[in-house]
Amino acid sequence: MPPSKLAIAIHKLTSCSGCQLALLNQGIGLLDLLEQVEIKHFIEAGINHFTAEVDIAFVEGSVSTSEDLERVQHIRQRSKLVVSIGACATSGGIQALRNLSDENWLQAVYAKPEFVSSLQHSTGIAEHIKVDFELWGCPITVSQLNHFIQQLLLGSKPKPSGEKLCMDCKRQQQVCVLVTQQAPCLGPVVRTGCGAICPTFGRACYGCFGPSEQPNCDSLANRFAGLGLMPIEIAQRFAAIHSHSPPFKDQYQRWQTIHVREVE
Amino acid sequence: MNNKRTIKLNVPFITRLEGEGALELSAQGDTIEKLHLKIFEPPRLFEKFLEGKSYKDVPDLNARICGICPMAYQLTSIQAIERLFGIKLPKQLVQLRRLMNLGEWIQSHALHIHFLAAPDFLGFDSAIHMAKQHPEILQRGMRLQETGNALMALLGGRSVHPVGLQVGGFGRLPERKRWDTVRTLVDNALPDAKSLIAWTTTLELPDYSHEFIWVSLKHSKQYPINGGKIAASNGLNLTYNSYDKHFHEHQVPHSTAFYSLLNGQDYLVGPLARLNNNYRILPSAIKKYVESLGIRFPNQNMFTSIQARAIEIYFSLYEARKILDKGCPVEAPYVTVTPKAGTSCFCTEAPRGMIYHRYQLDEEGRVIRCTIIPPTSQNQARIEQDLKYSVKKFGLNHSDQTLKFFCEKVIRNYDPCISCSTHFLDFKILRS
């Protein structure tokens, strides 16, 4: 008897649909994966059974509306494990940039904001329900998702890595862009997982995978200042994809409040 | 005869769309009283948070509008900004961008045809349920999709939110070895693409042709992706600068996406619009093959969109092959960039249709204001008009379930990318 398949669901809240592609971009590998998992709910792929009870619910997207909030609570009740996938679900995503402003952005973009319902803030799902595992990344990768599922199938407890991007970049023997180009690379404080693609392309990491374990953001930001970046540039460096994650938000606030005056 | 049936249909999620949307239909007897395509993708407010950001950060932030066509958003903003800064890229770099664009078309169209559309024509709920009975169809689709993704990763590092593009060129040019690997992939995919077009002729494609305006870029020398003029089927020929004089957006209570109209009228963007406008300049080998299969463009049957996508996949591989054959380039990956203040706009062809971006930047190249108009908000009004015509012709006497399925099929022809436009196909029919 083959072991029974894992029942999984893929949910989407406020997001760009890019992390769900970690399933649809598997290529032929998807057919092998379907031998091991049974997809109970995945709207983009045509399977709509929102109330199905599952072993794992993968949730893409942030909570940015009252419907998102209702859905995420409903997902928690019907799933043994809830796994957030991607920047939006883990830290509120790029749309969490509005959390940094006191202004009402809806009114600025929509002529008739009353037609659009939205919460003031965009937040990761762990702020609202218990989350069992987090897969960071903007986007998460095919191998990251498969590795996670294989660990569960083998009965071991997955431990997504929190090591720093610099480690992966060094193992790949890439030339350090911070040292050689004085580029404001976030590698020293960002989680591995992307394959160090930005340094490979000769450019500074901009933090898609979120803060690493024990990130020393103060030091790195000071280094950026030493490279000649203006405070606003340093603040914006940390406020991009994961602006709502505490270590990056702290840096944003630290540098946002430093005003620079030109002196004669 | 049931002459006054009340229709009250509610489909909370229309599946197999990128993003989520809903449809509400009210009818009395055989008269449609209300038909609303509801998009309630939560607003993400890109145009607002881009304000104050440097031109260097705009492409990476913009990619996050859509996971399926991130590059289109990156490149439209990049080209609008380059136009403002007066940057002209050397021809080889322009060709490399085109190569990457072709990759995005291939992967996006292959995803749509196989995962989203094919189940409609083969009688399945989903591609996943289709996998057992039609493994070879799905596998062919996956190979094509992988080839598109590989082209994007060659130049961008990854296919979702690539990192290779920047204002002024690329971060780095590809390595020779990877170039050759991708060339082999493209070589192998060409016969797949050809047989994909032939396969579309075996499908029973419904015909609900009717009059409508279509809009795409049009170019005299090449099939347009990143250049050309805006051409509408009603004879309008526009430059990017005159876009906002003719195209206007408005809001409706049932949708978070804006509706865009061309001089007050709904219009189509996307592969069918592109092929209708540019069929003539396809390579003659491709036209000959397409015609030998009895496929005819231009036409006004939205159900031939699946064929338009298959043809664009074949064309994209054909053209990619030509660029790859010229060999891996070795010149400088980028040109020097000097920011300038001012306003500039640009249009490109995303897989789902024309995108328009406009930016006003300060002298340091920081965004003061911007406007981003994705394809789906342009198609939204057209989808509603198509449904009003097609549902009536199909017949309101069908069961709610049959009507729901028919509407979904019509909508999927447009491959609406609801995440971009601003989420849901929830279907509501009210019969009274």
Image: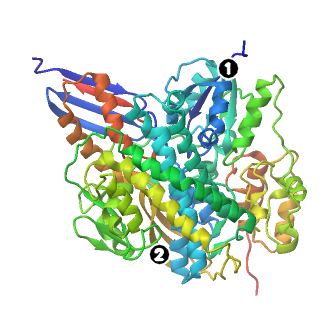
Residue A189 locus on image (x, y percent): 83, 53
Q: Amino acid at mark 2?
A: Ser
Within-10-Å neighbours for mark 1: few <14, some 14–19, many 20+: some
Q: Which residue is mark 1?
A: A5
Identified by mark 1, the residue type is Lys
Locate residue B343 relative to residue B121 in the image: left or right: right
Q: Is residue B99 left or right of residue B218?
A: right
Look at the numbered disc 1 and give the secondary structure of its residue. Answer: loop
Q: At which x and y percent is residue B322? A: 55, 69
Q: Nearer the viewer, residue A139 or B46?
A: A139
Instruction: Specify few, some or many for label 2: CA neighbours under 10 Å numbering under 14, 14-19, or 20 or more.
Output: many
- The C terminus of chain A lies in quadrant: bottom right
Q: Relative to residue B398, is residue B383 depicted above or below?
A: below
Q: Which mark is residue A82?
A: none
Splitting the image into 4 quarters, where does residue B361 fall? bottom right
Apparent side of residue B386 relative to residue B166 in the rendered image (left or right): left
Q: Is residue A23 above or below residue A53?
A: below
Q: Residue furthest bottom?
A: A264
The residue lying at 16 percent from left, 20 percent from top is: B5
Which residue of the protein is positioned furthest toward the front in this rendering? B292
Provide the residue designation for mark 2: B344
Q: How many numbered discs?
A: 2
Q: Position of residue A235 (x, y in %)?
A: 73, 61
The spot of residue B41 in percent (x, y) is 47, 42
